[in-house]
Image (cartoon, rainbow, N blue to C red):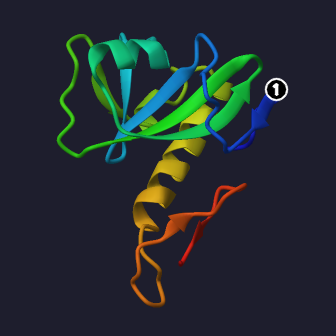
Amino acid sequence: MHTPAGFTSRHTLPAALPAGTLAFAFRDARMLVGGTYEAPLVPPFSQLEQMGVRGDRHYLGELGSTGCVAIHLPADAPEPEGWRYSGLRALFFRLPEPVLAIAARAFQVVEWDRTHRYCGRCGTPTKDKPGERAKECP
């Protein structure tokens, strides 16, 4: 996957998310989607909030004027009614290519955060490094 045209990468979660922000929410390696199998939909962040779906957030940036947030959900997060979890491969040729590229980036960020919670050298819990998407050992 590549960075789609019109995407501006950011790492700092704004105080208020732009209206229409898309939520790329992952439970393990599967992303929460709605719609039909042939035409899946990425949920707006505001709708996830209304459904009570919550997890660790990572701001990705904007695709045009649409905000994009990656969310790491707990492994036991239920499927909200009318929504399902899908692997990214099942979404190829079904989601628009720029949205699929952001979904792949979202998974990478969520997985990186999940697997880098401890220092690889000493085992101390890492902390987010201010000003960039990085972890550091305190």
Q: Residue at x 82, y 29 (%)?
A: 5
Image quadrant where residue 64 sits: top right
Q: Count the marks: how many?
A: 1
Res. 7 visible in picture: yes
Residue placed at 60% from the left, 22% from the top?
Answer: 16
Residue labelled with disc 1: 6
- For badge 1, the amino acid type reads Gly
The residue at the point 21 percent across, 35 percent down is 77
Residue 55 appears at what percent x and percent y? 35, 38
Q: Quadrant of residue 117?
A: bottom left
Q: Nearer the viewer, residue 6 or 92?
A: 6
Q: Against 66, is 70 above or below? A: below
Q: Position of residue 100 (x, y in %)?
A: 58, 31
114 or 132, nearer to the observer: 132
Task: Residue 86: name its quadrant.
Answer: top left
Query: From this viewpoint, which residue is outermost toward the right?
Result: 5
124 sits left or right of 12 in the view: left
Whole-percent x, y for residue 88 in the image: 45, 37
Can see residue 40? no
